Image: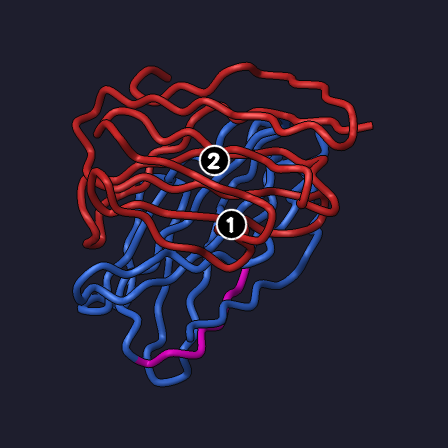
Amino acid sequence: GENVEQHPSTLSVQEGDSAVIKCTYSDSASNYFPWYKQELGKRPQLIIDIRSNVGEKKDQRIAVTLNKTAKHFSLHITETQPEDSAVYFCAAKKNTGFQKLVFGTGTRLLVSP
Amino acid sequence: DGGITQSPKYLFRKEGQNVTLSCEQNLNHDAMYWYRQDPGQGLRLIYYSQIVNDFQKGDIAEGYSVSREKKESFPLTVTSAQKNPTAFYLCASSASGSSYEQYFGPGTRLTVT
C-alpha cells in the first residue's frame, strides 16, 4: 500500500522567512496530494491540494510543487507570519474507485516574530 | 466550522469501560472516517465507511467498533480491548470516494485512567 514520508518533523523560522516541507510517496499510481494545516487543539483544514496533471499550484503565500518522476511533493510558504505556526500534514491517494487518504506524520512549524 | 460535529470535546473514562464517541455531519457526504491522533504521530485511520450500512477496517481497527445506520452518523466505540485508548479522535467526511476534500470534525480528546 501507499506510504508517505514527511520531513522535517519540526521547522523553526523567523517571521518573513520562507518555509519548505517535503513529502515522498511510494505508490506511483497516487495522483491526488492535499496539504492540511492543524492549529493547536483544532481540526485539520485543507489549505491547498494538487493533482498529478500539474506540477505546481499557488495560492497567495503558499504553493505546492509535485515531481511525479521522483515521487515527491513539497509545500512552500513565503513571507511567513506567526499565524502560520501549526502542524502541517501532507497526504496522498489514488483517484481510482474508493481510495483512502494516506497521511504523513506531520511537520510542526514555528514562526518566531 | 459547521457541517461535521463531534461530541463531547473531552471525555474521561475508567479503564475497562467501553465508550462511544459521536460524529454527525449535515454535508450529505457519503463517506465517513475515524482517525486517531497521538503526539508526534500522524493521522492513523481506524475505520471508514463508504455508504450507509457498510464500513471497513482501517490500519488500527483492533479494540474499536463502528456502525453506520444513518448517512449522517458514524459513531465510534472504544472498547475495553483497546490497549492504549487515550488519544485525540478525529472524525471526517467526504463527498465520495474520489479525490474530494475530507472535512474534519473538531475532535474528541479521550482520557482513560
- Quadrant containing the C terminus of chain B is top right
Label 2 residue SS: loop
Q: CA distance from mark 1 to mark 2?
A: 8 Å
The N terminus of chain B, quarter of image: top left
- Magenta stretch contains residue A26: yes
Pointer 2 residue = A44
Residue at 28 percent of width and 55 percent of height: A57
A79 and A9: which one is in front? A9
**Mark 1 closeness class: few <14, some 14–19, many ≥20 residues within 10 Å:** many
Q: Which chain is blue?
A: A
Residue situated in front as seen by the camera: A25 or B77? B77
Kindly identify the amino acid type of the residue bearing the numbered disc 2.
Pro
The answer to whether B42 appears left or right of A50 in the picture is right
Residue at x 29%, y 19% (from the top left corner)? B3
Q: Position of residue B14 (x, y in %)?
A: 78, 24
Q: Position of residue A112 (x, y in %)?
A: 72, 34
Question: Which residue shows up at 34% across the image and 85% down it?
Answer: A69
Q: Indicate yes or no whether the magenta region holds residue B48.
A: no
Q: Which chain is red?
A: B
Q: Give the residue furthest to the bottom.
A: A69
The quarter holding residue B8 reads: top right
User: Which mark sits nearer the N-terminus, 1 or 2?
Assistant: 2
Q: Which residues are magenta?
A: A21-28
Residue that mark 1 sits on? A89
**Residue at the extreme right:** B113
The image quadrant of residue B2 is top left
| Residue displayed at 34% across by 59% down | A33
Local secondary structure at mark 1: strand
| Residue type, mark 1 in image | Phe
Task: Please tell me whether residue A67 is drawn above or below residue B102 in the rendered image.
Answer: below
